[in-house]
Image: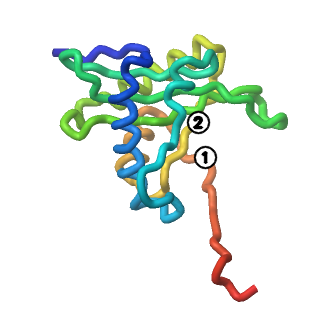
């Protein structure tokens, strides 16, 4: 059966919370600053109900297998655009990877941003997460800026 993409509802929350833990588990190896134990990245309920964001899910046989969100953010005053669409919470269940579900979700999120008259789209990805970077590049994203960090706790300053 072909996947169906639809807006998420609060009834989907338990599955989406599980998917959120999958995102965190996948990202922990790339980020030593993430706290140990169970944490949350997102306020999924707010992302679903806010007029400035939307969460979409892909279903196969009435089972949610992928998700992602777009959020409209005011951008910096010196940029050519006033707003950006920020994409996040991209997750595809392990059993369904390789079926272009992430592309389907991204295409839907991009269409939603366009209906909001927002044309500058951004997302974050860890620089060592090569498969994810390649997936985003396939959709048309390009590397733009590198965010750098330094932990000075144990430095002799």
Q: How many marks?
A: 2
In front of the other: 120 or 4: 4
Q: Residue at x 74, y 29 (%)?
A: 74
CA neighbours of label 1 inside 10 A, class few (<14), some (14 to 19), many (20+): few
Q: List x then y, in percent, for residue 68.
A: 44, 29
* Residue lying farthest to the left in this orientation: 1
Q: Is residue 32 above or below residue 105?
A: below
Characterize the local packing of mark 2: few (<14), some (14-19) or many (20 or more) Cα atoms within 10 angstroms.
some
Judge from the rendering whether residue 138 lies leftward or rightward of residue 110; answer left or right: left
Q: Please state the horizontal and vertical placement of residue 118, each as a whole percent of the image.
A: 65, 20
Query: Which of the two discs, 2 and 1, sits closer to the camera?
Result: 2
| Residue at (43% x, 47% y) in the render | 133
Circles 2 and 1, Cβ within 8 Å, touching? The answer is yes
Seen in the picture, residue 118 relative to 147 is either above or below; the reply is above
Determine whether the residue tagged by mark 2 lies in a helix, strand or loop.
strand
Circle on res. 40: none
- Earlier in the chain: of badge 2 and badge 1, it is 2
| Up-down relation of residue 38 to residue 11 (above or below) | below
Residue for badge 2:
122
Q: Is residue 18 above or below residue 48?
A: below
Residue 77 percent location from the top left of the image:
83, 34
Estimate the spatial distance between the alpha carbons at disc 2 and disc 1, rounded to whole Å: 9 Å
Check the image and name the residue furthest to the bottom.
156
Say which quadrant the N terminus sits in.
top left
Locate the C terminus and report the quarter of the image it occupies. bottom right
Q: Residue at x 50, y 16 (%)?
A: 111
Q: Nearer the viewer, residue 103 or 36?
A: 36
Left or right of 26 on screen, residue 154: right
Give the SS element for disc 1: loop
Q: Position of residue 47 (x, y in %)?
A: 54, 25
Residue carrying label 1: 144
Give the residue at x 19% y 37%. 95
């Amino acid at each position: 059966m072909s996947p169906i993409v639809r807006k998420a509802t609060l009834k989907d929350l338990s599955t989406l919370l599980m998917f959120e833990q999958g995102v965190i588990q996948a990202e922990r190896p790339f980020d030593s600053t993430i706290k140990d134990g169970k944490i949350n990245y997102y306020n999924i309920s707010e992302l679903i109900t806010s007029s400035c964001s939307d969460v979409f899910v892909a279903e196969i046989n009435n089972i949610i297998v992928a998700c992602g969100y777009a959020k409209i953010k005011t951008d910096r005053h010196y940029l050519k655009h006033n707003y950006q669409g920020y994409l996040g919470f991209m997750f595809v269940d392990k059993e369904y990877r390789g079926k272009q579900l992430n592309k389907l979700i991204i295409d839907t999120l991009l269409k939603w941003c366009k209906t909001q008259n927002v044309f500058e789209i951004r997302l974050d990805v860890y620089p060592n997460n090569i498969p994810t970077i390649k997936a985003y590049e396939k959709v048309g994203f390009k590397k733009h800026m590198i965010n750098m960090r330094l932990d000075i706790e144990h430095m002799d300053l």
